[in-house]
Image (spheres, rainbow, N blue to C red):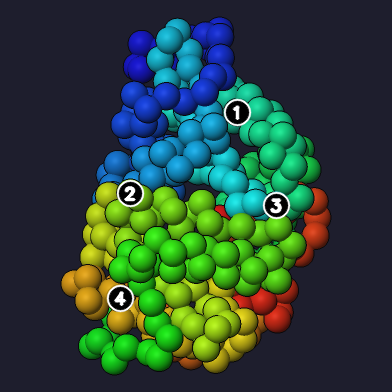
């Protein structure tokens, strides 16, 4: 890469990312974000966390790469949750910053959302970076709410909750029931929101576990958790990539179930993101001892709240 750093005329082409590119794309991601944040060892940014492989095998269509002289110099990921989509991480090798590469990746990313008939798209970025906020605004994304990525040290295991099920231990017929119920719950939160692909990805790729909490015949809450190194969680961490509950009590029980899962897996830390616009959910996480590690801004296209509303008991962070 060094021999290209001063070649400002190097043409940049955007193409689908291939499986063979994933290792290089991940290295560029660590270097780019670590450099942007000023880390003394940039490659240690999110060390042990893999945002690429699991997402790729779930939806390779959402992966785009940028190359110059046949070398990968950046990538972007578009994720598809039914009527909702989000992009990122978008990462460009530092040698190619400020050359319009991100814009070249964003153009086909937005086209993907349009082709998927995405009603509401979003992204997570750093609120102090006016350059990034301005770039995304050019593509119709508006900064709206802060997102707190929060964590806590797990406590000793709690007893199992009534109605608690782990997706991995269910029969195919019961798994099908849980998938259907998850769609009914998420659709009630935002029309068309569909997490079934994420649930299947965690199960098929053994990335962690999906927890379902039932109250009789009604699904009360569910959480999609990544567990440990080489997932989106990282070493010794249980990461709640998405969680949803019908009400405050359901969210409290869901967080307890996630914490118990972490202990059973030998993990010492639990992490989850929540929009500060979901006021009650945010307050309850604080009350349970969660503290904010990273504060980002969620940008929305179109400029609407989506499911980031005070009455929504949803955990996610669009990273």
Q: Which residue is mark 2?
A: 205
Observer able to see residue 104: yes
Nearest to N terminus: mark 1 or mark 3: 3
Where residue 191 appears, as percent x and y from the top left, is 74, 62
Nearest to N terminus: mark 4 or mark 3: 3
The numbered mark at residue 311 is: none
Where residue 71 appears, as percent x and y from the top left, is 40, 15
Q: Which residue is mark 1?
A: 105
Q: Residues within 10 Å of mark 2 (few under 14, many from 20)?
A: few
Query: Viewed as shown, does residue 269 lie left or right of 319?
Result: left
Q: Report the residue at 80% width, 60% height from top.
A: 304
Nearest to N terminus: mark 2 or mark 4: 2
Say which element carries label 3: loop
- Please state which of residues 70 and 86 is positioned toward the viewer in this rendering: 86
Nearest to N terminus: mark 3 or mark 2: 3
The numbered mark at residue 261 is: 4
Q: Residues within 10 Å of mark 4 (few under 14, many from 20)?
A: many
- Please state which of residues 257 and 47 is positioned toward the viewer in this rendering: 257
Say which element carries label 1: helix
Q: Report the residue at 48% width, 17% height from top.
A: 67
> CA separation, marks 2 and 4?
18 Å
The numbered mark at residue 83 is: 3
Say which element carries label 2: helix
Question: In the picture shown, does residue 104 fall above or below 7?
Answer: below
Query: Viewed as shown, does residue 295 lie left or right of 161?
Result: right
Nearest to N terminus: mark 4 or mark 1: 1
């Amino acid at each position: 890469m060094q021999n290209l750093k001063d070649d400002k005329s190097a043409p940049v082409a955007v193409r689908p990312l291939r499986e063979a590119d994933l290792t290089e794309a991940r290295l560029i991601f660590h270097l780019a974000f670590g450099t942007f944040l000023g880390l003394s060892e940039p490659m240690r940014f999110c060390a042990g966390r893999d945002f690429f492989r699991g997402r790729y095998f779930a939806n390779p269509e959402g992966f785009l790469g940028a190359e110059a002289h046949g070398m990968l110099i950046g990538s972007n990921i578009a994720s598809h949750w039914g009527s909702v989509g989000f992009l990122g991480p978008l990462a460009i090798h530092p040698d190619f910053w400020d050359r319009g590469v991100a814009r070249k990746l964003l153009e086909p990313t937005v086209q993907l959302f349009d082709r998927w008939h995405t009603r509401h798209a979003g992204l997570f970025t750093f609120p102090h970076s006016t350059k990034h906020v301005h770039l995304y605004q050019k593509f119709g994304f508006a900064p709206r709410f802060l997102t707190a990525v929060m964590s806590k040290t797990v406590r000793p295991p709690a007893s199992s909750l009534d109605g608690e099920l782990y997706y991995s231990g269910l029969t195919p017929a019961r798994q099908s029931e849980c998938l259907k119920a998850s769609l009914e719950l998420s659709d009630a939160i935002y029309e068309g929101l569909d997490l079934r692909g994420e649930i299947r990805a965690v199960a098929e790729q053994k990335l962690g576990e999906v927890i379902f909490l039932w109250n009789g015949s009604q699904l009360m809450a569910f959480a999609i958790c990544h567990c440990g190194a080489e997932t989106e969680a990282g070493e010794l961490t249980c990461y709640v990539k998405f969680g949803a509950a019908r009400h405050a009590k359901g969210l409290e029980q869901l967080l307890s179930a996630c914490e118990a899962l972490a202990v059973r897996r030998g993990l010492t830390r639990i992490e989850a993101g929540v929009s500060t616009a979901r006021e009650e959910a945010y307050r309850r996480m604080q009350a349970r001892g969660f503290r904010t590690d990273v504060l980002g801004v969620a940008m929305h296209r179109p400029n609407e709240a989506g499911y980031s509303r005070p009455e929504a008991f949803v955990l996610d962070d669009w990273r």
